[in-house]
């Protein structure tokens, strides 16, 4: 997870940095006291899926911190060299070992407190054989009335599941852009 | 703009880093040879708006590199401490000095080549008084048949404008998630 003001040394020369507002800027940035390089710190994207099988969705029980033992949708940090959709597919493969085809974007959630944006896509499962990776204790399907709402790992997961089931009832999926306080 | 493999020194201790795959990972990461800190490099978000006045949209002529002198929609890097929508509004204020109210999300475009995701929102202009900041040579309104398609700064701007005018013709706006090669 992102740590604010964690840059103590310059990535180019190793010199000590200070947080100060550069001349043509309006925010504190870690600036090298030796070579003057300015270091920017920006929000990160978390990308994932709502894997769907009939009227069920796939959740994974986390084998890692934070929120070890809680249920989540497959998701993780977007990497360089991939699109949002490719990242979401990669995480679904790594965490659930599922076979699926990607469908539309469902949610874009800003989580300001931790400097993240979470993007979830719907994915249609092609079978019910799952091979979860080391980050997952267990992967299983849940109907809406079986979702362990009080044991979900993150609010972005809860809100995304609510969007999914609400849209499904309406018979029309749309993209939900919102903020998580 | 993001520079791949630009981390030569550890941000915590200033020690030299090497790019190597950490034990529980599958990608090269800059890892400190002294304190072992792993440095992650991830895509950045660019957030902006399509500011609308009747059948016209507001474009800004860039006073900065890259693409100095070309036309763009107001947009820039998302900062910590803001939502995607707040960042888009801030950039619109900074670059165009416009008064507006934010409307829905319009495009989510992965630009893998430069490690970015661009998110554009529609914004309704409240008047036609603009006070462009130092990054803008000129801000003016264009009808669809006046858009300088060959003098647009970026393909994300071109595609977002096309989505906007196409949706407007249909009388229904939606969110367009796509990749820019």
Image (tube, coloured by chain):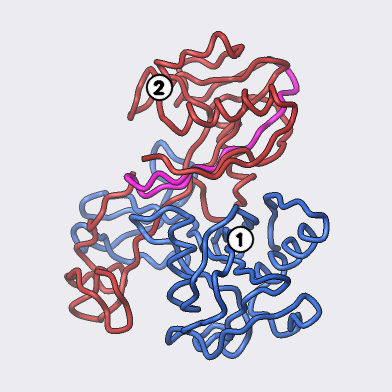
Chain colours: A red, B blue
Q: Residue at x 41, y 29 (%)?
A: A154
Secondary structure category for the residue under label 2: loop
Depth check: give the residue in front, B145 or A143.
B145
Q: Is residue A71 left or right of residue B58?
A: left
**To which chain does the residue with label 1 belong?**
B
Quarter-wise, where is residue A172 in the image?
top right
Residue B73 at x, y percent in the picture: 60, 73
What mark, if any, has residue B122 been given in the picture?
A: 1
Q: Which residues are magenta?
A: A110-128
Quarter-wise, where is residue A128 in the image?
top right
Q: Residue at x 51, y 35 (%)?
A: A75
Q: Mark 2 sits on what residue?
A: A63
Q: Residue at x 81, y 79 (%)?
A: B145
Q: Residue furthest top?
A: A146
For the N terminus of chain A, the image quarter is top left
Secondary structure category for the residue under label 1: strand
Q: Residue at x 72, y 36 (%)?
A: A103
């Amino acid at each position: 997870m992102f740590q604010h003001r964690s840059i103590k040394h310059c990535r180019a020369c190793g010199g000590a940095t200070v947080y100060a507002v550069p001349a043509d800027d309006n925010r504190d940035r870690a600036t090298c006291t030796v070579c003057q390089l300015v270091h920017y710190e920006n929000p990160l994207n978390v990308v994932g899926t709502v894997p769907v099988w009939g009227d069920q969705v796939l959740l994974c029980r986390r084998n890692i911190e934070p929120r070890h033992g809680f249920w989540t949708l497959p998701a993780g940090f977007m990497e360089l060299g991939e699109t949002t959709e490719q990242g979401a597919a990669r995480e679904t493969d790594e965490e659930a070992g599922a076979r699926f085809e990607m469908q539309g974007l469902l949610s874009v959630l800003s989580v300001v407190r931790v400097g993240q944006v979470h993007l979830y896509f719907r994915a249609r499962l092609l079978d019910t054989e799952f091979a979860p990776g080391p980050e997952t204790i267990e992967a299983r399907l849940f109907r809406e009335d079986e979702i362990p709402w009080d044991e979900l790992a993150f609010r972005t997961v809860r809100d995304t599941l609510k969007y999914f089931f609400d849209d499904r009832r309406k018979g029309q999926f749309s993209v939900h852009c919102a903020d998580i306080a």
